[in-house]
Image (cartoon, rainbow, N blue to C red):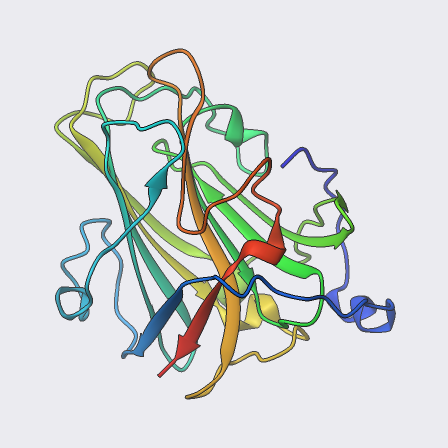
Amino acid sequence: MHTLNYYFIITTLLIIPMKTISQNINESTLLITPCEDFELNGNGDQGHWDEIPWTTLQSANNAAYKTQIKMMYSATGVYVLGHCEDRLISTRYRTDQGDIWNGDVFEIFLQTGINQPLYFEYEINPLGAELAILVPNDQGTFFGWSPWHYEGDRKIRKAVKIHGGTPDPGEKIKAWSVEIFIPYKLLTALQNVPPKPGTEWRGNFYRMDYDSGERETWAWQAIEKTFHEYEKFGRLIFE
């Protein structure tokens, strides 16, 4: 996650040679249900979220807090809902495209072309600060590229809701939740975008929390050292 951010024209990535990769045969599968577009409020009570079952992330540190996610897709983009039990907002980062992983954070990794070591990473924290980057990963060597013209219908929509407190550093809370909409226009020129019924992406979902003073982590698919182990990504199948 330590990245160098550069502005880029995404189509130039099409001429970069990409190595075929093998995937983890023990990965889980998440079925992505279609939906109509809807407005976000951070609560997860809009759209058809109530029809989607929760998927629980696994804690690497046996943390008491539960972290759960849901995902849907529409004709214009993908929706992700995250719910994070918590007791303390342990971040002070309010600036976008910064090192927000050094505080409480929820993360999404999406690999649309399953045979290329290239994936989109999105992070958001309880204060609403975000990080959006495209990551080419060459055998563990990786850097993040910031999107160009990240605005208008290319910009991610987001809504954060703090439960039992206010969105301030050090605030005692009960949980925080986040709704995220990633438009396909932001992912233009990547493979398998937009997805169709039967399309397969790969991906993982993560969370970090620092309430104890040490970093605690959660993941949908188990990792060994870093969130960037794309070989361990799970399957995302669009229905």
Q: x, y (%) of residue 148?
A: 69, 57
Q: Residue furthest bottom?
A: 197
Is 133 situated left or right of 156 in this image?
right
Q: Does the rendering let one see residue 47?
A: yes
Number of numbered callouts drawn:
0
When the figure is inspected, residue 4 is found, relative to residue 138, above or below; the finding is above
Q: x, y (%) of residue 167?
A: 27, 27
When the figure is inspected, residue 134 is found, relative to residue 195, above or below; the finding is above
- Residue located 71% across and 61% down the image: 117
Q: Quadrant of the C terminus?
A: bottom left
Is 134 situated left or right of 26 in this image?
right
| Quadrant in the rendering for residue 232 | bottom right
When the figure is inspected, residue 163 is found, relative to residue 54, above or below; the finding is above
Q: Does the rendering let one see residue 83?
A: no
- Residue located 46% across and 57% down the image: 156
Q: x, y (%) of residue 101?
A: 52, 31
Is 90 situated left or right of 45 in this image?
right
Q: Residue furthest front?
A: 26
Q: x, y (%) of residue 95?
A: 52, 31
Is 134 situated left or right of 216 in this image?
right
| Quadrant in the rendering for residue 173 | top left
- Residue located 43% across and 15% down the image: 214
Q: Quadrant of the N terminus?
A: top right
Identify which residue, 231 or 202, lies in the foreground: 231
